[in-house]
Image (spheres, rainbow, N blue to C red):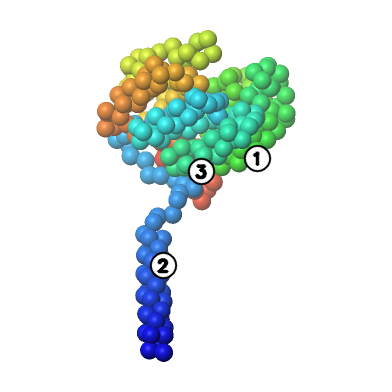
Amino acid sequence: MKMMKVASLLMVLLAMLSCGNNNETNKEKEEKAVEAPPKPKPGTPIKFDSSKRYIYLTWDDSPQPPGTVVCRDIFRKEGVKATFFAVGMHAFDMRRRKLAEEIRESYPEFLLANHSYSHGFNNQYKKFYTQPDSAVKDFQRAEAELKIPVKIIRLPGNNSWVLDGEMKGPKSTEGVYKKLGELGYNVIGWDVEWGFKGGNTPIQGAQEMVKIVNEKFEDALTVAPNAIVILAHDRMFAKPQYQDSLTRFITLLKADPKNVFETIDHYPLINYPKDKDTTATKKAK
């Protein structure tokens, strides 16, 4: 009997100690939950510093592995933010769709934006832009299927802009970007393009691209002051030698303390809803 009583007491003590440990664990979890800041939502306003130069890396035609994966990993390793403009039809299998989801969920590090569903009816740009209603539905399909979190679009094969009511672009695409503007979409073009040949081979080297970027800033040849939108395509950096070029490009830009990398939802002239207006947007008006 004595042995049974002793065993019972030991079990009670162990149970009490176990409860105490669980309570401590729960308390620690609660403290951590309080300390962790809420994850910002895409489009959350930021405070702009007029002494800085804002760089927007915008990569088109995602998801296109291995290029998309390579670029994402380089951006992450270098600690810079970037925007991936996605094409809905490129997420045709679970692997690619999962990659698009990973980019979307990685905000504020990366932003997933809209580059249409069909990439302009499979690069048939004339047909695409002469059918504005169909083109708009194409963008809306991409937005719905990829769960794109922002109303920010880049037109396939075309440098057009719709920013806070201001519209700019060639006559051939006017019908499309006007409709998009009326529906509350922002359309983003580019200030500098990292060109390619043969479908995926970069034309410029890293130092040449940095020189172009610096000249654009110095000569005030960007759409918004102190902000530059750089266009490239994911597939350009799939091969090791071009990966090195991208890394070098970012490293050289990072060496200048004036440069700040941001996602395109923080472009100064983006038309936020009135309750999300930023200081930079107000100044632009």
10 Å crowding of disc 1: few (<14), some (14-19), many (20+): few
Label 2 element class = helix
Above or below for 33 versus 22: above
10 Å crowding of disc 3: few (<14), some (14-19), many (20+): some
**Residue 112 location in percent, x, y?**
53, 36
Label 3 sits on what residue type? Glu
**Residue 105 location in percent, x, y?**
51, 43
**Residue 141 location in percent, x, y?**
68, 35
Counting the numbered discs, the total is: 3
Mark toward the viewer: 1 or 2 = 2
Residue placed most toward the observer, 171 or 234: 234
Q: In screen coordinates, is 178 left or right of 49? A: right
Q: Quadrant of residue 185?
A: top right
Q: Quadrant of residue 1?
A: bottom left
Label 1: which residue? 144
Image disc number at residue 61: none
Residue placed most toward the observer, 67 or 141: 67
Label 1 element class = helix
- How far apart marks 1 and 3 lie (CA) works out to 16 Å
Label 2: which residue? 26
Mark toward the viewer: 1 or 3 = 3
Label 1 sits on what residue type? Ala
Q: Earlier in the sequence, mark 3 or mark 2?
A: 2
Label 2 sits on what residue type? Asn
Identify the residue shown where x is 65% and y is 23%: 120
Image disc number at residue 105: 3
**Residue 150 location in percent, x, y?**
55, 40
Residue placed most toward the observer, 58 or 225: 58
Identify the residue shown where x is 58% and y is 33%: 95
